[in-house]
Amino acid sequence: MSDPIPPDVPDSSRTQFWVKRWEDGTLPWDLGGIPPNLVSFLTRSSASPARVLIPGCGTGYEVRAFHEAGHDVTAIDFSGPAVAHARAVLGPLGDKIVQGNFFKHDFGAQRYGMIYERGFLCSLPPARWPDYAARIADLLLPGGKLVGLFLYGREPEPPPFPLTDETAEHLLGRLFTLRHTEPVLAPTVPVYQGLEHWQEWEKLDG
């Protein structure tokens, strides 16, 4: 399991933690564009257009990539400054951004064919990870995919909170099958350097 969180680490599950960072412009996770691994995935993927959800979307650069690939994409973030910034960056696609709590928002009865992950899971304290896995599984169709960039390794000053192979298997292995994994070799933000892996998890039918 994950290491205990030092008592002086702020609670990154609280909205104000992220609001302050957006207001201060402290955005070390912001790549400034679409990750090359997502571009590669969308190029090589033969998947039919699907409903796609992006939780904890931040600036939401990836919304444009999924939209241009033909997918019906929705993104959500609970930070008001993040949502305002994303809507400004995305222009006409800004209406794809919802301000709300991923764990409590009513997404309706229809499920998603794909959920995209980058930076959201690792931003959550490990105590919230089981809630994340359960919520993702609930929102995905059987056979739906959880794809994106997952952090593995150790971070001396969290957040982010990286996974290990063991925690990932414990967290996701009962609900998903790992179909593809590869380390990210493309340049990324310093806070994620050497930690990112592109992964594609498929929800089990049961």
Image (cartoon, helix red, strand yellow):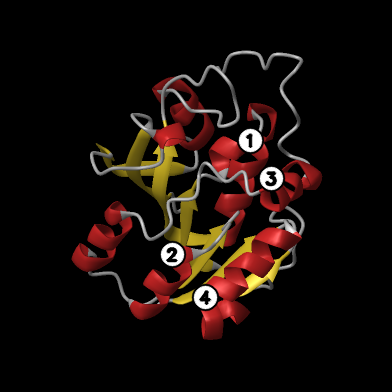
> Is tag 2's residue or tag 1's residue first in the polypeptide sequence?
2
Label 2: state its secondary structure.
Answer: helix
Q: Which residue is mark 4?
A: 90
> Is tag 3's residue or tag 2's residue first in the polypeptide sequence?
3
Mark 1: amino acid: Pro
- Give x and y (percent) for residue 194: 33, 29
- Give the alpha-carbon distance from disc 4 to disc 2, as whole Å: 10 Å
Q: Residue at x 75, y 61 (%)?
A: 80
- Give x and y (percent) for residue 91: 54, 81
Instruction: Describe residue 124's horizontal placement relative to residue 169 as left or right.
Output: right
Q: Which mark is residue 130?
A: 1
Name the front one of labels 3 and 2. Answer: 3
Name the front one of labels 2 and 1. Answer: 2
- Give the alpha-carbon distance from disc 3 to disc 4, as whole Å: 20 Å
- Give the alpha-carbon distance from disc 2 to disc 1, as whole Å: 25 Å
Q: Residue at x 46, y 30 (%)?
A: 168
Camera-nearest residue between 114 and 156: 156
Relative to 81, does residue 72 appear above or below in the rendering? Answer: below
- Give the alpha-carbon distance from disc 3 to disc 2, as whole Å: 21 Å
Q: Which residue is mark 3?
A: 21
Q: Residue at x 69, y 45 (%)?
A: 21
- Give x and y (percent) for residue 6: 70, 13
Dot 3, crowdedness within 10 Å: few (<14), some or many (≥20)? some
